[in-house]
Each structure stands twice: as C-alpha cells, then as structure tokens.
Amino acid sequence: MCSSDLARVFALAFKRVSFTSDLLPADLTGLNVFNPAEASFRFQPGPLFTQVLLADEINRASPRTQSALLEAMAAGRVSVDGTSHALPKPFFVIATQNSLDQVGTSPLPEAQLDRFLMRLSLGFPDRASERALLRAGFDPTSNRLPGLGPEALQQLQHRCSRQHCSELLIDYVLDLVEVSRQRYPGLSPRASQGLLAAARAWALLEGRDHVVVDDVQAVLPAVVEHRLDAGCPARHGSPHSEALLQAVPALR
C-alpha cells in the first residue's frame, strides 16, 4: 500500500511534494500574496495544508527547507510572517529518503528525525515478486481498496488510546529509555510516548485490549533506530534496539 492508498482508505486529503535542492520553505508552508483589488495581503496556503503529506526524497532538500516541517509535525500548524495557521486534522507526514552516500543528500537533523514515529525499510522485492512486476508491470491506480473513512479512523485512534498499560509495562518502557540515555545520545520523551503509542496500536492489531511486553518489543526497532543512529541505518540488523532489549530484562 502506498501513501495515496492510505489516504484513499480513510478518505483523507493527500498531497505529494518532491523535495529538491531548490525547494524553499515557502513552497511548503505558503506565503502572503498581495491582492491589489483589496489593497491587502492574503495568505495562500502551501501543500502542507493537507491531511496526508508525502515528502518524497526528503533529504534532497536543504536543511532550511527540511526545518519547515518541524512546527507542522509537532504542533499541527505553520507560522508565516508572525501569524499561525492551523493545519487540517488529522495531519501526518510520510517521507522517503535516499541513502546519505548518494550525491545531493542532506542528513535530517535529530530534532526532525525525532518527529517521525517510525522508520521502515522496504528493501528489494523477492525474485517472484520482481518477476511478476516485469511481466505485468505496475499500475498504482489499479488498487481498489475498501474505504473506512475519517470517522472509522477516529474510532481506531480512540481505541488505541484506551489500550490498558500496566505500571510494570510502563516501567519497562522507562527502563529502555533510561538505558538508551546511558549508552547513546538518548531517547527523548517524544520517543517514549511514541513507543507506547505504537505498542498500543500493535496490541489492537493483535486483538487484545491491553499491551504486553511482546508488543513493545515488536515495534521497538522501527520506533527507536532512526533516533539512535542519526538517520544512518546499519547495513545489517537493528543493533541499537537489540542492545536495549538485551540490557533490559523483560518482566512477563
């Protein structure tokens, strides 16, 4: 499923922006345009004013342009010329990035990496899938997925937030975070919140109304690795999350 399919399933507004070296912050946030008829400035919203934003090849843009996403991802608003403009709800960003050893890439700052809940690596398709791709081609518009709608999304979000977490499980999450702060630059409070939120969602997908240690361990690599390796993924495995799991005994 691609990001446009995700937006289509929940009937959300979708926009895609190719992040290039000449992209400016105003190209994302929008700007105030003078209207001669009214002799005043009117705000013209940029592509950030959507519900699902695909930031394609995000690390090809300059750090200045990348930073235009910080307020949007953290507070759900953008500020232009001293005025704040609220973004639609829900709002979230899906980004793709290139390897940092490619020409023309700029690493994402730690503050922005921390705003992404997860990092997933798709890798290459297996041989059978790639054979099917070569034989039949791929048409992204051919997918006709059943829709759920915004109300169903809100209900799922509400159910996730009500997943029960015991004090022992919260202590386990805090122990993982504490060990990360002793060994690495350390996981932020935003990371610990994201880890618990992702574990709640995983528990819901597993058909439970409570979170267990296995849920935290299942989502840990995707939630913490990009925060601990400064956006430079290891070529083999998830060494940071594996080290955390070994250092913190799990109570079951």
Image (cartoon, rainbow, N blue to C red):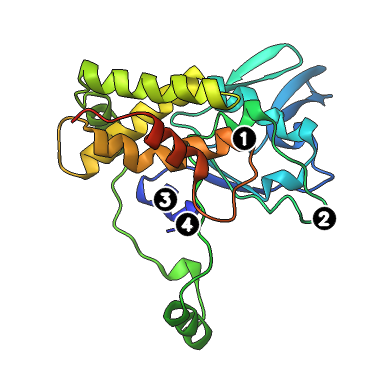
> For the residues marked 2 and 3, what is the alpha-carbon distance in whole angstroms?
31 Å
Counting from the top left corner in percent of width and height, residue 135 is at 49, 88
Residue 139 falls left or right of residue 100? left
Marks 4, 1: nearer the viewer: 4
Q: Quadrant of residue 42?
A: top right
Residue 125 falls left or right of residue 19? left
Q: Earlier in the sequence, mark 2 or mark 1?
A: 1
> For the residues marked 4 and 3, what is the alpha-carbon distance in whole angstroms?
6 Å
Q: Give the SS element for disc 1.
A: loop
Q: Earlier in the sequence, mark 4 or mark 1?
A: 4
Q: Could you tell me which residue is drawn at 50 percent across and 29 percent down?
A: 88
Residue labelled with disc 1: 48
Counting from the top left corner in percent of width and height, residue 84 is at 64, 15
Q: Nearer the viewer, residue 196 or 153?
A: 196
Note whether residue 49 is visible: no
Q: Amino acid at mark 1?
A: Leu
Q: Earlier in the sequence, mark 2 or mark 3?
A: 3
> For the residues marked 2 and 4, what is the alpha-carbon distance in whole angstroms?
26 Å
Tag on residue 2?
A: 4
Q: Amino acid at mark 3?
A: Leu
Residue 22 falls left or right of residue 199? right
Q: Earlier in the sequence, mark 1 or mark 3?
A: 3
Q: Give the SS element for disc 4.
A: loop
Q: Crowding near pointer 1: few (<14 within 10 Å), some, many (20+)? A: many
Residue labelled with disc 3: 6
Q: Earlier in the sequence, mark 2 or mark 4?
A: 4
**Label 4 near label 2: C-beta < 8 Å?**
no
**Label 3 near label 4: C-beta < 8 Å?**
yes
Q: Crowding near pointer 4: few (<14 within 10 Å), some, many (20+)? A: few
Q: Amino acid at mark 2?
A: Val
Q: Give the SS element for disc 2.
A: loop
Residue 74 falls left or right of residue 67? left
